Image (spheres, coloured by chain):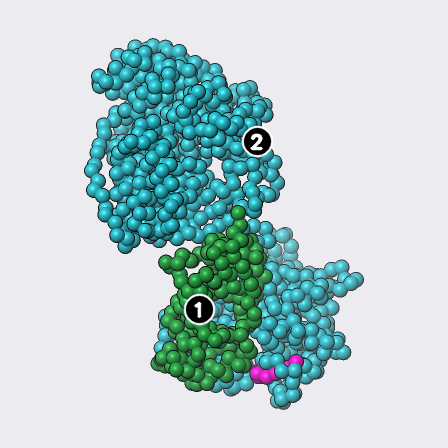
Chain colours: A green, B cyan
Amino acid sequence: MVERDLEAVVLPELAMFAVAPRRGEALRQRSQRALPTPLPECGRTLFTDGLRTVCVRPDQWLVLGEGTAEWLGALLAEAFGDAANMVDVSGAYVGMRVRGAGSRAALGKFLPLDLHPRAMQAGHAAATLAAHLPVLLWQADDMPTYELLCTRSYAASFRRTMELIGVF
Amino acid sequence: MTNRLSQGGLIDRSVTIPFRFDGVTYTGYPGDTLASALLASGVRLFGRSFKYHRPRGLLSAGSEEPNALVELREGARREPNVPATMVELYPDLVAASQNRYPSLRFDLLAANGLLAPIFGAGFYYKTFMWPASFWERLYEPLIRRAAGLGRSATEPDPDHYERATLFCDVLVIGGGAAGLAAAREAGRSGARVVLCDEGSRLGGWLLSEPGPIGDRPAAIWAEQTVAELQTMDEVRVMPRTTVLATFDHGTYVAVERVADHKLMPEGGEPRQRVWHIIARRSIVACGATERPLVFGGNDRPGVMLSGSVRTYLNRYAVTPGRRAVIATTGDDGWDLLADCVRLGVDVAAIVDRRGTIAADRLDLARRAGAQVFAGGHIGATAGARRLSAVEVLDSGGKRQRLTADLLAMAGGWTPAIGLACHLGAKPVWNEESSAFLAAEAPPGLRLVGGAAGLIGLVQALESGAHGGAEAASACGFAVAVPAMATHSEAAAPLWFMPANRQKAFVDFQHDVAVSDVALAHREGYRSVEHLKRYTTLGMATDQGRTANVNGLALMAQMTGRDIAATGTTRLRPPHTPVAIGALAGMHRGRDYRPTRLTPAQGWAREQGAVFIETGPWLRAQYFPRTGEDDWLQSVTREVHAVRSAVGLCDVSTLGKIELVGSDAATFLDRVYVNTIATLPVGRARYGLMLREDGFTLDDGTIARLQPDRFVITTTTGEAHAVMSHLEYCHQVLWPELDVHFVSISDRWAQFAVAGPRSRAVLQAVLDPGLDISGDAFPFMAAAEGRAFGGLRIRLFRISFSGELAYELAVPAPQAETAVRALMQAGAGEGITPYGLEAMSVMRIEKGYAAGGEINGQTTPRDLGLEKMLAKRKDYIGRVLMRRRALQEASRPTLVGLRPTDRSARLHGGAHFLALQAPATAAHDEGWVSSVAFSPTLGHWIGLGFLANGAARHGERVRAYDPLRNRETEVEIMPPCQFDPEGVRLHG
């Protein structure tokens, strides 16, 4: 039987920046003071007051928030000044939130990742190729809730895949 | 159910299950397989053999079955070559025998058996050789019809399949005594354990074992152990799941038969699910397969493996015969004799290869009323469609004919080491256990029980528990590893009983007999790999699980070597056959792979675009209008619109990468052949990237938006390759450079607005503040700004059409709104959407290189772009590009071409030949890379590569296409055939 003890919703459009330190800058330390949500270590994500920071590769962070690219760009410029190389990737991804006890089993048909609580907990993030789709994801809470992002041009295939694995 | 015992067995006699086989209705019980239910109903004949169409019955009771292969289900769900021994009985099951005509009992092709002397190994190779043209038309169809396996369904599969990933600490493969013991030990430690078993009910041999484990019957012990495992949170028990293959890094592939035991899948479940199991440690507890004995007439229905006879007796309460002869090389046959005594099955004789037999066993035989042949063997068998008599030879060679309808053979055991060998480990012959063992298992994998050559219940339980505990401990879970004692048992293997002229089969499924092995030997095919391919031994769907060792032993005997020196063929995945549909999972039909759509795809669809797949992308090829019944008409109209007014093309598929950092310009200088550092802010430049070997990787534009911020474009097809190349350059070659780059291909939609009226269209949508007049925003200008009332945009004055043109980037989510606004703003100017074809026509008119020219085999010199090469800097590909061979004048370089007869059509792929030269490869001077009908010039034009091309403009050559047998005389032109001065471009 398809597990139905889960719910899935499409995430709203997100402002998003890819942030990397300029040569020699200690961006993480700087973010502790300057951002409502500091930059996490690699493989982790943090979230406070509508601002999410994610790290899935060394020395690069993604900062996401519901709002305009201008708003987020200004916020980050103020926080980091010249210490960061930033690229605006707002709107480049579409997102989906999957939550509920059945989400692990359902997403196991899609993600080649260990979602078991011993391996992945709230605050963990990963980037992977799932069913040929580039996917960025993190576990938001212990319910568990997962948030998955996929590049926009694959949005239709991403949604179709979610239907095929019984998430939608 | 005439052959069903009145009690015992792991079946539920309170429920009767009706099913059909070859059109006849039978009944069975829950717990039965198709094989056991048919056997209970007195069916002995299950199929006809592959080559000789000999009658065949059950050999075994498991997945190694070579004979009883059936077509299961009907219509679109029909599945061929399913072992009846693996089919769980369900109500209204329908199955049919295969490889017979017109019926199983009367098979016309059984006449092949009479021709057996000429049908030996290599028959096809020797016979169907001449004439060669007959092979496809006559021989192959004929052979396929005669030597068929079953028929697969011809309609699309109505069911669906899934793939899923599973992670664990300890994977236990096989749920018999050893596997259950391993899983229990590992599970108790708290490790994450997955236990897979191919059967519907876990227990393996325990389900056929009448003896107790401690104070409980073995089957009850199995049931209770499974129940205990199921109470453990971190243990997952997976019945009906066969592990097919072992891959690197602890990856295993398994197929779970989710709904094969039902009439059809229920409630949206898949028929089968393929699991990728990633395990830190694994325990292979797949047991061992019993070997048949090789003697004349050993394939007659009624000749079965001894252990399988015990399974039918004990597990299914079915008597496979009324009067049995038991032939054994070790103790196994005596265990069967004990079962027969207990259940009241008549045994005529027991033939033991060993010369001395213990007194208690002789006692047992006496009680059974069975003759004992110590040191004897089987000579021959008799019977038409089933066994009726067995000829036994005693130790002195004296023959005796015994009436029997069941002959049980116990030839020793072949450990199931396949999964340990998939990664390349060679099986090693172990004389003591007369079997190949996996001497070198892959890292993290361990064999236990029968799979490790440890035959017997006590050893299985001990080695399993030890293996499970050790695996859990290796994963960091606290567990006491129980000590393990080692045991050994003596057996007297026997590989062939030479006796008479009857065919003695080695590989039942492929009809390979001793005579075929002998023929291979005589003709020099003595290596095991040659033996396998010449005779097809072990190449059937059962992978020779009951045949391989006997075949090797025979070859060893014939060549006078021992088995260790003879060696064995490689064991490869899959362990058992797997349906392609299961491996494909959800990726079938339109879901074969994902599709990339541009953000304005919906708009293009509304415009009636015809789409074409380019890589993962779906791109608008052209936009037909009412009245146009040919793509060329539409494309011609679109080109005219761009050249005379204005056109709009979605170019969002181009790769876009944004680079930022104080060293961004330095970085780009090193990857492009031309100088980027001198590019002013607000300007763009055409650039070429090379591979390290000097050949062109890709082309595109570089725009400098801020002193330390660039946007580069790549071609659609090479976007990934370029990104990987840049990542390599930064991460490996120059990590010290301060540059950060990110793909923005999905962040911005991009539209080309091209044609003499394009400026007017853009002026209408841009917000005040961005002056795009010719002076303020010249050719190759770039800027950020706002349009459509506040929307952030990027504008580039670049042109792929040769016209005054712009590329406008808008945020992807707003792409549809923007394109509609552009179309509205351009309505008065006659704005026309154009697709990939028109774009391609215009770039050929302009002589711009694209995929046909930048094909991984051309250098900047070949492309006529030598002038772009920077002289005073280094860049990737610079050194190897200057190899002498790449500088030869005779090397083909880019040219334009047109047909001498302007009404003639050009074709891509044709080769250039001098007018008088013969059409041979030695005179080949180059090729045609791209062609198009030019609506602007009114005739076909093309691009190509011609030896010393730049010096040959005006010359005439032949464009010769031997593949399609076409030839056109063409005139060599400069690559750019339209507006060579670029007046319109700078307009």
Q: Quadrant of residue B139?
A: top right
In the rendered image, residue A53, in percent from the top left (x then y), is placed at 44, 73
In the rendered image, residue B213, in percent from the top left (x then y), is placed at 29, 32
Determine if marks 1 and 2 fall on one subunit: yes
Q: Residues within 10 Å of mark 2 (few under 14, many from 20)?
A: some
Main SS category, magenta section: strand
Q: Residue at x 52, y 41 (%)?
A: B259
Instruction: Give the label on residue B92, or none.
Output: 2
Q: Provide the chain ID for the residue under circle 2.
A: B
- Please check the rendered image and state whether residue B671 is part of the magenta-colored stretch, yes or no: no
- Please check the rendered image and state whether residue B787 is part of the magenta-colored stretch, yes or no: yes
Q: Is residue B694 visible?
A: no
Instruction: Give the label on residue B725, or none.
Output: 1
Q: Residue at x 34, y 35 (%)?
A: B221
Q: Residue at x 48, y 69 (%)?
A: B722
Relative to residue B440, is residue B839 drawn left or right? Answer: right
User: How far apart are the two marked residues, 1 and 2, measured between alpha carbons?
Assistant: 59 Å
**Label 1 vs label 2, nearer the camera:** 2
Q: Quadrant of residue B874?
A: bottom left
Pick out the residue farthest to the right.
Answer: B627
Q: In this picture, which residue range is highlighted in magenta?
A: B779-788
Q: Nearer the viewer, residue B277 or B548?
A: B277
Give amino acid for label 2: Asp
Q: Provide the chain ID for the residue under circle 1.
A: B
In the structure shown, which secondary structural element does the residue marked by tag 1 occupy? Answer: helix
Q: Nearer the viewer, residue B719 or B232?
A: B232
Q: Is residue B808 above or below residue B616?
A: below
Q: Quadrant of residue B885?
A: bottom left
In the rendered image, residue B254, in percent from the top left (x then y), is placed at 43, 45
